[in-house]
């Protein structure tokens, strides 16, 4: 089911891919443009310009979708191209969380709602701890790499491992929504990302465990 809606979503963009391929656009151009836009979004996140980042992220995601379509339309699909694309995907996504971590680490206050002073008799709405949110962003970065690694390692052992509720498209979509919603909601979005990305890692570990037990039985 997870793969079906993604395939249906990709179908919507295939005409754009065919159009770009017919106009001589190279898949590498789209890949590089996607990385550049992701780095720009990461810069915006690091500066705290969440709205700007939220507007740039969909364009980066569109490039990520179209580069594969253009490569297939032009008959330029190759193992190295797939390898390079996956490697640059990690760079792009990693930069986004580093940008967020930088923003939170360099500011003692954020714009989320947090109850403080409960035990002091003067409850007030204040800001969450920036360092905590910075660490949370880096934790999501590690987990997102683990999601990719578990699949790559499983496939290296001859097993398919495409399960999981929070793969890269879902993570970028969730992060983009959080950026558009703004500072107040981003900490909650990061919490959701952390939990669901952790669940995805565990899903893949469990999936591979089941496969290995079946093969050994």
Image: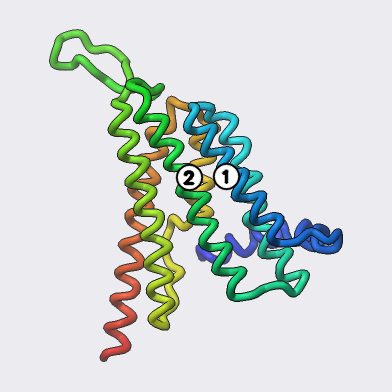
> In this orientation, which residue lies closer to the viewer: 107 or 176?
107
* Mark 1, residue position: 38
| Along the line of sight, the residue nearer the viewer: 81 or 203 | 81
| Residue drawn at x 45%, y 48% as measured from the top left | 94
Q: Which residue lies furthest to the right in this view?
A: 23
Of mark 2 and mark 1, the one earlier in the sequence is 1
Q: Are the two marked residues, 2 and 1, in contact with CB atoms closer than 8 angstroms?
A: yes
Secondary structure of the residue carrying tag 1 is helix
In the picture, measured across the screen, residue 115 lies left or right of residue 178, that is: left
Label 2 sits on residue:
95
Q: Residue at x 38, y 43 (%)?
A: 192
Residue 16 at x, y = what percent? 78, 56
Marks 2 and 1, how far apart in space?
7 Å
Query: Which image quarter holds the C terminus?
Result: bottom left
Q: Quadrant of residue 44?
A: top right
Label 2: few (<14), some (14–19) or many (≥20) C-alpha neighbours in 10 Å = many
Instruction: State the count of labels.
Output: 2
Q: Is residue 52 above or below residue 200?
A: above
Q: Position of residue 80 (x, y in %)?
A: 59, 72
* Residue drawn at the location 50% of the way across and 33% of the way down: 45
In the rendered structure, the answer to whether residue 192 lies left or right of residue 93 reads left
Please, what secondary structure does the residue beneath circle 2 have? helix
Q: Which of 215 and 31 is in front in this view?
A: 31
Q: Is residue 171 above or below residue 126?
A: below
């Amino acid at each position: 089911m997870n793969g079906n809606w993604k395939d249906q979503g990709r179908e919507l963009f295939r005409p754009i891919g065919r159009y770009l391929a017919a106009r001589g656009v190279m898949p590498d151009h789209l890949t590089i443009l996607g990385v550049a836009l992701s780095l720009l979004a990461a810069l915006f996140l690091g500066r705290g310009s969440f709205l700007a980042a939220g507007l740039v992220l969909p364009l980066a995601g569109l490039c990520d979708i179209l580069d594969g379509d253009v490569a297939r339309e032009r008959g330029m699909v190759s193992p190295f191209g797939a390898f390079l694309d996956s490697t640059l995907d990690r760079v792009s996504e990693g930069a986004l969380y580093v940008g967020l971590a930088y923003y939170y680490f360099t500011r003692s206050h954020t714009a989320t709602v947090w109850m403080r002073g409960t035990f002091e008799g003067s409850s007030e709405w204040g800001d969450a701890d920036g360092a905590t949110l910075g660490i949370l962003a880096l934790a999501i970065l590690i987990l997102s790499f683990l999601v990719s690694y578990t699949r790559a390692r499983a496939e290296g052992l001859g097993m398919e491992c495409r399960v999981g509720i929070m793969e890269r498209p879902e993570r970028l979509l969730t992060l983009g929504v959080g950026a558009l919603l703004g500072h107040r909601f981003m900490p909650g979005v990061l919490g959701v990302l952390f939990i669901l990305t952790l669940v995805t890692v565990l899903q893949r570990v469990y999936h591979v465990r089941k496969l290995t037990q079946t093969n050994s039985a």
